[in-house]
Image (cartoon, rainbow, N blue to C red):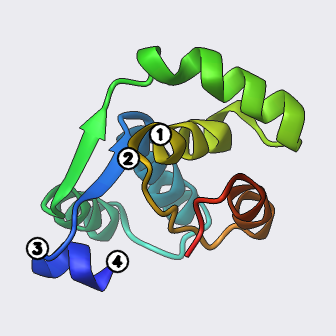
């Protein structure tokens, strides 16, 4: 990921990424771990990251198949489907998604 932030590599994600980030930050606000202002600022910072997003629509068929075969949520399978389509390495902190990515050959 550091290479992507420096501009040495592309960072790709389904367009779902933005709403997932907003959802995580909202949970933190509701738990009172962040103020609404802090969360808003973090969301702006995330939006400045050099991430190229792609429409989830074109990934849904393969994501559905991957979710069913790998035991993933449809949301997580979108990231795996994009990695496979682009022949890219998947970066994740989610162990279940990492294992599926390893099985599919797109985890470093």
The mark nearer the N terminus, 3 or 2, is 3
Find the distance from the CA under tag 2 to the CA under tag 4: 12 Å
Q: Residue at x 58, y 59 (%)?
A: 106
Find the distance from the CA under tag 1 to the CA under tag 3: 20 Å
Where residue 40 appears, x then y in whole percent?
Answer: 26, 58
Q: Which residue is mark 3?
A: 7
Q: Which residue is mark 4?
A: 1
Find the distance from the CA under tag 3 to the CA under tag 4: 10 Å
Image side of residue 105 versus residue 73, left or right? left
Callout 2: SS:
strand
Q: Compared to 3, does 69 lie above or below?
A: above
The mark nearer the N terminus, 1 or 3, is 3
Q: Residue at x 30, y 32 (%)?
A: 54
Image quarter of residue 4: bottom left
Q: Residue at x 75, y 24 (%)?
A: 65
Q: Which residue is mark 1?
A: 82
The mark nearer the N terminus, 3 or 4, is 4
The mark nearer the N terminus, 2 or 1, is 2
Find the distance from the CA under tag 2 to the CA under tag 1: 7 Å
The mark nearer the N terminus, 1 or 4, is 4
Image side of residue 37 versus residue 102, left or right? left
Do the residues bearing badges 2 and 1 touch, measured as CB atoms within 8 Å? yes
Callout 1: SS:
helix
Please tell me which residue lies in front, 58 or 103: 103
Where residue 95 appears, x then y in whole percent?
Answer: 77, 70
Question: Which label sits on residue 13?
Answer: 2
Find the distance from the CA under tag 3 to the CA under tag 2: 16 Å
């Amino acid at each position: 990921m550091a290479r992507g932030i420096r501009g040495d590599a592309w960072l790709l994600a389904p367009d779902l990424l933005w709403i997932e980030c907003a959802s995580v930050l909202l949970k933190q606000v509701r738990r009172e771990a962040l103020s609404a202002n802090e969360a808003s600022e973090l969301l702006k910072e995330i939006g400045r990251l050099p991430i190229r997003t792609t429409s989830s629509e074109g990934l849904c068929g393969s994501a559905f198949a991957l979710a069913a075969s790998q035991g993933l949520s449809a949301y997580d399978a979108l990231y795996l489907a994009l990695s496979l389509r682009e022949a890219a390495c998947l970066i994740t902190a989610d162990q279940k998604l990492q294992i599926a990515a390893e099985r599919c050959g797109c985890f470093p």
